[in-house]
Image (cartoon, rainbow, N blue to C red):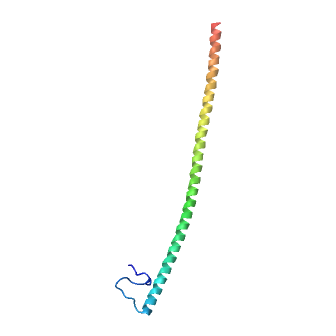
Amino acid sequence: QARPVGWPLCYGGEGMSLPNMSDHSSTCVADLQERARLQGTAASLREMIAASEEQLSEQCRLAAEAEAKVMEQRLFAQLAGVKAQAQELEQAEVLQTTELCQQEVLISEAES
């Protein structure tokens, strides 16, 4: 409900007259106390949100580090597999080269 500018916070709205001053004062005090309580609650909630955001940020950082370690392990495993495959290919190449040389020697001997 809208209250006219300059009217107390506890004014009830259009069509309502202000109570006598002692009732008005106690109503305003109650409103101020409620306002202070709500401000305290809001401050507490802001602190909780800030703490939750900080915790979430830390959890995200830890999760990213853990994921990076897993990725690193996978990449090292893939690298080891590629190195082993490259070594096998080199050994196969050496074996084929040796066999080709032996075949050339046999062919040369057969032709002579």
Left or right, 27 with respect to 63, comes to left
Left or right, 103 with respect to 7, comes to right
What is the x, y in percent for residue 76? 61, 43
Kindly give the residue lying farthest to the front in the view shown. Answer: 5
The image quarter containing residue 91 is top right
| Count of numbered circles in the view | 0
Kindly give the residue lying farthest to the left in the view shown. Answer: 15
Toward the viewer: 88 or 18?
A: 18
Kindly give the residue lying farthest to the top in the view shown. Answer: 112
The residue drawn where x is 43% and y is 92% is 21
Left or right, 24 with respect to 46, comes to left
* Quadrant holding the C terminus: top right
* Quadrant holding the N terminus: bottom left
What is the x, y in percent for residue 94? 64, 25
Does 40 appear above or below 102? below
Toward the viewer: 6 or 101?
A: 6
The residue drawn where x is 50% and y is 75% is 41
What is the x, y in percent for residue 2? 39, 79
The residue drawn where x is 57% and y is 53% is 64
The residue drawn where x is 63% and y is 22% is 97
Toward the viewer: 88 or 68?
A: 68
